[in-house]
Image: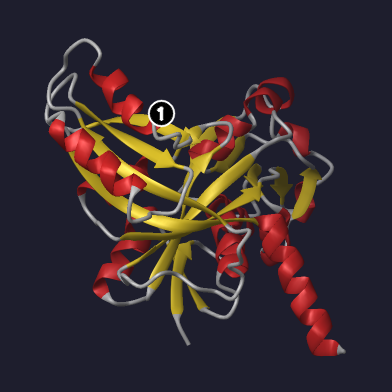
Amino acid sequence: MERTGYLGPQGSFTEAAAKALVPNDERVPFRSIPDTMDAVKEGTVSRAVVPMENAIEGSVNITLDYFIHHQRMNMAAEISAPIEQHLLVAPSHLKSWDRVKKVYSHPHAIAQCHQFLRTYLPEAEISYVNSTAAAAKYIQENQQENAAAIANDIAAEAYGLKIAQKKINDYENNRTRFMLFTNEEAPFTNGFISAKTDYKTTMMVGLSSDYSGALHQVLAAFAWRKINLSKIESRPTKTGLGNYFFIIDAAMKQDDILIPSVCEELKTLGCEVQILGSYPCFTWEELSGFQKEMVKKEVT
């Protein structure tokens, strides 16, 4: 059985994503995103699932930066999942939830619930932890503290907490992309890939110099080939102020013609180009539906 690491502890959104993406793997929790990714390189697990981007808060920078600068692996697959944040408290604090003195959660979860916190818990102190599940676990272990956690319903059940307020995220269309990283070069398979499965190819592009129209020329290499870009993002090279590279997601599977020709054109412009991965993209809804169908077939 394969072992997949995920940002833990038990009950995290990332665990749910890992279970949907690779349901037959043994899942191993880690306390931070770098620890989870390190575990793949060290051979503790075969692959790792970590959050990559949130629809409300944007990229999870620690994931992207640690991957780029410290722990290069293969982007093997992604899953996009809906995120619903709840305010969790110990059972003894359920009736007095609006008087809690402290709220624990991951920075992204806190930011996703900013308006709720301003409106209903304006005096509560905010304390950041490594994951929403870690926040729920802390509340379970410190029930005497007048505090709450922002996490999901899975964490509430796992740690015996009560949902004081449901769906407190400020925007309804709250989704997160989770990325599966692996050292394996072979294409990822989980039994769910079909002819309808979407793919992305992620590239890192460094401009040769900062001159007028440089980025336009990069984008033109994709545009005239009619390659749709689902995302383009700049990140600092960490070599000095004003030095950036670009992460570009092309909405297609790496092929033998279009992607290689883009790379060659960019190189002739003096750009540094690296392909970081070409991978299948799933949604929580389609994988859940597929697994339900599999269960029905097994029962009948």
Among the 4 quarters of the image, the one containing residue 96: top right
| Quadrant, the C terminus | bottom right
Helix, strand or loop status at disc 1: helix
Q: Is residue 296 left or right of residue 121?
A: right
Q: Is residue 91 left or right of residue 114?
A: right
**Mark 1 is on which residue type?**
Ala
* Residue 277, image x, y percentages: 35, 55
Residue 263, above or below 236: below
**Residue occupying image coordinates x 31% and y 19%:** 216
How many tags in the picture? 1
* Residue 52, image x, y percentages: 45, 46
Observer-nearest of 248 and 216 = 216
Q: Which residue is mark 1?
A: 223
**Residue occupying image coordinates x 17% and y 24%:** 243
Q: Is residue 71 left or right of residue 92?
A: left
The crowding category of the residue bearing disc 1, from other C-alpha atoms within 10 Å (few below 14, some 14 to 19, many at least 20), is few
* Residue 162, image x, y percentages: 78, 53
* Residue 91, image x, y percentages: 78, 54
- Residue 216 at least partly seen: yes
